[in-house]
Image (spheres, rainbow, N blue to C red):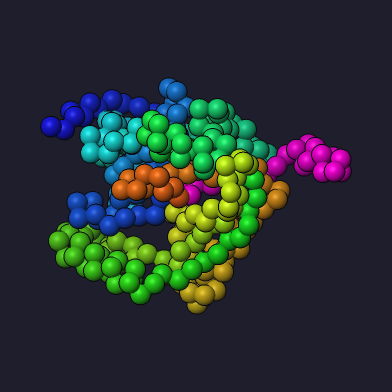
Amino acid sequence: MSQKEVWEQKEILVWGKTRPEISKSYREIVCTGGVFRENRRLVRIYPVPLRYLDNEKEFRKYQWIRAYVAKSSSDPRPESYKIRYGDIEVLDRIKTERGGNWDKRAEWIINSQNVVRSVEELQAQQRSDGRSLGLMPPLEIVDIVASPLSRAERESFWARYKAAVSQMELPLDPETGREIKPLSPPDYHFRIEFRCDDPRCLKPHVFSVLDWELDALYFRQLQSRSPQRASRDVVDRLRETCGEGRDLYFFLGNISSHQQIFTIVGLWSPRKKEEEVVQEKSQLSLF
């Protein structure tokens, strides 16, 4: 017997959106990451058919929204909540301050209850209490690569795509009158290889990056460039985002069907403050 879903109105600061998934009921759904205003804890909300929302309901990263949410009865992960997307109210956005300062965002996002030391620590917490989201500062970026989807992956996706679209009533683009179809996947997996600051981290991790912003960049570049060049542009963006001058954290989230497997679902990457860079250089000079 499923647990009754209790709906409550909450305010949520959005920090990320994952790659859209095909849904027969919602056309496309996006898992959206945020923190509750009341306790600043990480939360996962879905389904959000983001491309199909009315303009006044669309929201951006680091924007507050108000909506009715309920703990999901079908997803046991403690951070997973359903949302009534038809009732979303878009509120203020926390913009960066002069010089790209992210401190006002950090007040809500970066805290001890959200941050973990390593992938190994997050996996241990998942085993003990089901935790499925965490913020982690990587010790070292080893490599960033784009790997083409295999033939089997492409065939599997397009089979599911055609089956889902055939049962949908697709909306029309008001300008062209054409049906708006769900997005196809990018031609590449984008992955980051990294090490954790933890003696339990015995070898580098290689995690997929499912941040929707990267997919959007790939499709924009694809309008005027080859797939190979577009994929290099995405890798270049990731290299910049993960560069030495950044205060880098990964938003890590697991896969519902394989809960010990985590992916990168978002990136926190403000530029380091000048005093932080000076301090790091002085520390290095001691060795």
Q: Is residue 116 visible?
A: yes
Q: Position of residue 40 (x, y in %)?
A: 47, 27
Residue found at the very far left of the displayed protein: 1
96, 106: nearer the viewer: 106
Q: Quadrant of residue 174?
A: bottom left
152, 165: nearer the viewer: 152
Q: Position of residue 264 (x, y in %)?
A: 48, 49
Q: Is residue 76 magenta?
A: no
The residue positioned 41% from the left and 66% from the top of the image is: 186
Residue 136 lies left or right of residue 84; in this view the side is: right
Q: Position of residue 37 (x, y in %)?
A: 44, 26
Q: Quadrant of residue 68?
A: top left
Q: Is residue 63 visible?
A: no
Residue 170 lies left or right of residue 251; in this view the side is: left
Residue found at the very far bottom of the displayed protein: 226
13, 92: nearer the viewer: 13
The residue positioned 45% from the left and 67% from the top of the image is: 188
The residue positioned 58% from the left and 49% from the top of the image is: 202
Q: Which residues are magenta?
A: 264-287
Placement of 49 over or under 64, stated as above or below: below
Q: Quadrant of residue 133?
A: top left
Residue found at the very far top of the displayed protein: 38
State which quarter of the image contains the N terminus: top left
The residue positioned 73% from the left and 39% from the top of the image is: 273
State which quarter of the image contains the C terminus: top right
Q: Is residue 282 magenta?
A: yes
Q: Position of residue 271 (x, y in %)?
A: 67, 45
Placement of 51 over or under 223, stated as above or below: above
Count how many numbered circles sit on residues in the image.
0
Placement of 38 over or under 236, stated as above or below: above
